[in-house]
Image (cartoon, rainbow, N blue to C red):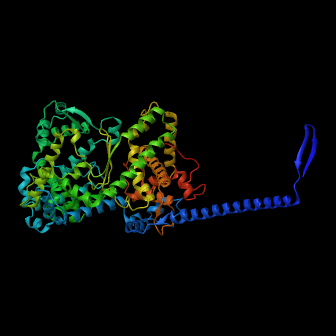
Amino acid sequence: MWTEQASGSGTRRRRERSPEEELHTAQDGWWQMTLRALRTLLLFSIILGLSLLLWGYVFQGCGPSPCRTSVCQDLLDLYLASGNTSVAPCTDFFSFACGNINRTGSPFQALAEENKRRVRRILETPGSWRLAPGEEKAFEFYNSCMNMSAIEAAGASPFRQVIEEIDQPELDVLLKQKQEPNYAQILREYLSYLNRLVTLLGGDPTKVGNDASYSLFINSQLNQFLRPGEQQQAQGKVFEMVTVDQLQRVAPAIDWLSCLQATFAPMSLSPSYRVAVHDLEYLKNMSQLIEKDLMKHRDFLQSHIIFGLVKTLSPALDSQFQEAHRSLSQKVGELTGRPPMPVHPRWMTCVEKTEAFFEPTLATLFIKETFKPSTHSAAMELFTTIKDTFISHLHTVPWMDRETRAEAQDRLTQLQVKMGPSEWALKPDPARQEYDDVQLGPSFLQTFLSCVRSRQARVIQGFLQPFSSHRWQVLPWGLKASYSIPDHVMVFPAGLLQPPFFHPGYPRAVNFGAAGSIMARELLHIFDQLLLPGGCPACDTRALQKALLCLERLYAALPSPKGTSFNVSRTLLEDAADAGALAIALKAYKKRLVLFRGETILPNLDLSPRQLFFRSYAQVMCRDPSTQDPQDIRSPPTLRVHGPLSDSPAFTRHFRCPQGALLNPPSRCQLW
């Protein structure tokens, strides 16, 4: 039915709905509302279900799961043994991580000893390796060194045979000053030692009294000529380049050209040849002492050199000589407060000497045994992440200008890295020629001397090669990374990239906290020069000095362990590297977590992944604070832990440190 309706614009017609149509319309509206409600409910159910699934996936399937492999179990045992979890981490994290370090020992020391054991296992299983011609001499040398019955049977006779051939071994310096406390007692111990040596050599012990007194006097004089390294560095005289002729004029008591030619044969030297001299002033004073006193006592010089040679050759002599020197070291150490000579088992001494004389062979075998391709790949991946993070991190350094930042980023981009093995360590061919001049026997002392001459010849041969062909002088079993400034190459030895600092099967938090922080620290040291006065003229020097002063005050406010002292100004560069390394390694770890899921943790340690990161960082620094050298350019280990952690807001957050806690200071610094 249609109806009309008048309006201002005309008449409108509309159709009126019947009751049946109205009913259908109402029903349609109700169904539409019902469908909308059902759709909404269904969508909500789907979202809720997906959320529950995602929660379970993230926190159960993708969350941190415990690592239960043998390498993780060994690491867990170490962490539990070295730490003291009863200590509040926000108050004393060093004790929390390293409180029982006196019982477990420094991880670096333990790793160095473990690397020695790895080399020992290689040397004691020669049948397990395919050796190139000549390389078997390394195993024969080790066996000869371990044959103490033959060495004891030979006694002093092999040594007496070489006395006439000696040159100038390194002399053993006992005293820094003649006025050393307990000087008389030390003199008596030294006299007793010389008497014992003379008796072992078949001489007359009644004639050594004057030699002992004079030896201590000369050693005292020579030590007074030494200048501290800091003084030499401040004067820019750590190394001085002079010609042989200039050196002869400065220190005329020694025929330098003849000595250098004899030492570096077959190099061709002349008076105009330039040499790098360490502490030229010392050589000048030594020359004056020789002209004034020593030339009048030629007999004394001969005896003095022979006595000094005993220390150099002691590993090749029978146990009586070794015991005599060890006893002297212990007694003098007690009188002067210096640590005595450590007592090593015979196998360790033999391993060290075999490493020194047959490095090319053992380097190759050590790499094959300890640094698998998977380890190399994981280490390179870690380093790349650390380096890339550092490059991007430079944008946040407030005192660095744009040009300096770009130059620093370019240097990092162009940096080369040798991870684990150097290239030469994987090429055994040169060993065939390098050991041709090694003569084994008939006595171990003669074998030892033959190896000394062979190694010296290899060193000289290296000088004759172009610089680009030099091998990296980083021992594969060593623990110290190296950076070559001329070549812009960084080397991380295989011996360092081992448990407890690194393993492909470790939780990423461990690898980034330990090995990652070590890598970041080495990268930061490339730019130490920027932090020195005048090292970065274009930088915001005011902001830089403010950050340096802030860091210096931060460390100065931390308590030092009892019985230790350090100079904050002397350790500032190392402190800056420690604090910056922690920040960069943490940022790299976070970046890695975003890109790759599936983090693991150590079971039964009650530490989250990020807490485990900080725990692993501290483990690198675990060391007995009482062994700190007052002249060390690094801070005591407690401060190397507490300084960077107190400068990290993330540490405070993840360990929930309250305000006022030692490691939650009111203000922090941003140097790097």
Q: Report x, y in % for residue 344.
A: 25, 63
Q: Residue furthest front?
A: 1
| Count of residue discs | 0
Q: Is 338 in front, or is 434?
A: 434
Q: Is 504 in front, or is 51?
A: 51
Q: Report x, y in % for residue 11.
A: 91, 41
In the rendered image, which quarter is residue 118 located in? bottom left
What residue sits 7% from the left and 54% below the top? 162
What residue sits 38% from the left and 58% below the top? 501
Q: Report x, y in % for residue 248.
A: 16, 33
Please tell me whether residue 523 is drawn above or below residue 54 in the rendered image.
above
Q: Is residue 576 visible?
A: no
Please tell me whether residue 195 is drawn above or below residue 473 in the rendered image.
below
Residue 514 lies left or right of residue 2; in this view the side is left
Q: Is 445 in front, or is 658?
A: 658
In the rendered image, which quarter is residue 38 located in? bottom right
